[in-house]
Amino acid sequence: MNNGTSAGTRQESVRTQQLAMASETAKRIAEMRRKALAVHIEVIHKRNQKMAEISASLNATMKAVRSRHESVRMEMRRETVNREVHLRVSRGLQALEEFVRVLRQSTVTDKRLTEAIRDPVVSGS
């Protein structure tokens, strides 16, 4: 009988050790989960910070590009207007040169002079 009692005590001792190990393992798992959650939260926080930095940088770059494009568009408009003005002035000067040449080559009556002045090419209208 002593062996039976000894075996029972031994089983209780093993069972107690198993419960203690299970409890310790559960504590370790809980601690690992807590640490993993803390690391996860920190990684998310760093990711969000980096995304905010990238977003701010991207917005600044886009603003600079838009500003540059607007400057280029304004310069192109200015060049177009200058070209048109130059073209009109050149045409007006050519018409005026032609008018002066005709005046030198012929005698002009008041009627012809008035008609020439009212000509849109000469008057610039």
Image (cartoon, rainbow, N blue to C red):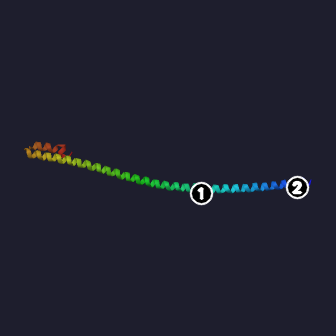
Q: Is residue 54 left or right of residue 37?
A: left
Quarter where residue 19 is shown: bottom right
Tell me residue 43's x, y (percent).
58, 55
**Crowding at mark 1 (Cα within 10 Å: few <14, some 14-19, many 20+):** few
Q: Nearer the viewer, residue 38 or 93?
A: 38
**Residue identifier under label 2:** 6
**Residue identifier under label 1:** 42
* Element under disc 1: helix
Q: Are marks 1 and 2 in contact (CB under 8 Å)?
A: no
Tell me residue 119's x, y (percent).
17, 43
Q: Residue furthest right?
A: 1
Question: Which numbered tag is attached to residue 18?
Answer: none
Residue at horizontal 57 percent and vertical 56 percent from the top? 45
**Crowding at mark 2 (Cα within 10 Å: few <14, some 14-19, many 20+):** few
Badge 1 amino acid:
Glu
* Quarter of the image that includes the C terminus: top left
Q: Is residue 112 left or right of residue 51?
A: left
**Earlier sequence position, callout 1 versus callout 2:** 2
Badge 2 amino acid:
Ser
Residue at horizontal 27 percent and vertical 50 percent from the top? 82
Residue at horizontal 9 percent and vertical 47 percent from the top? 104
Tell me residue 54's x, y (percent).
49, 54
Q: Nearer the viewer, residue 30 or 86?
A: 30
Q: Residue furthest front?
A: 3
Quarter where residue 118 is shown: top left
Q: Residue furthest left?
A: 107
Q: Is residue 47 left or right of residue 73?
A: right
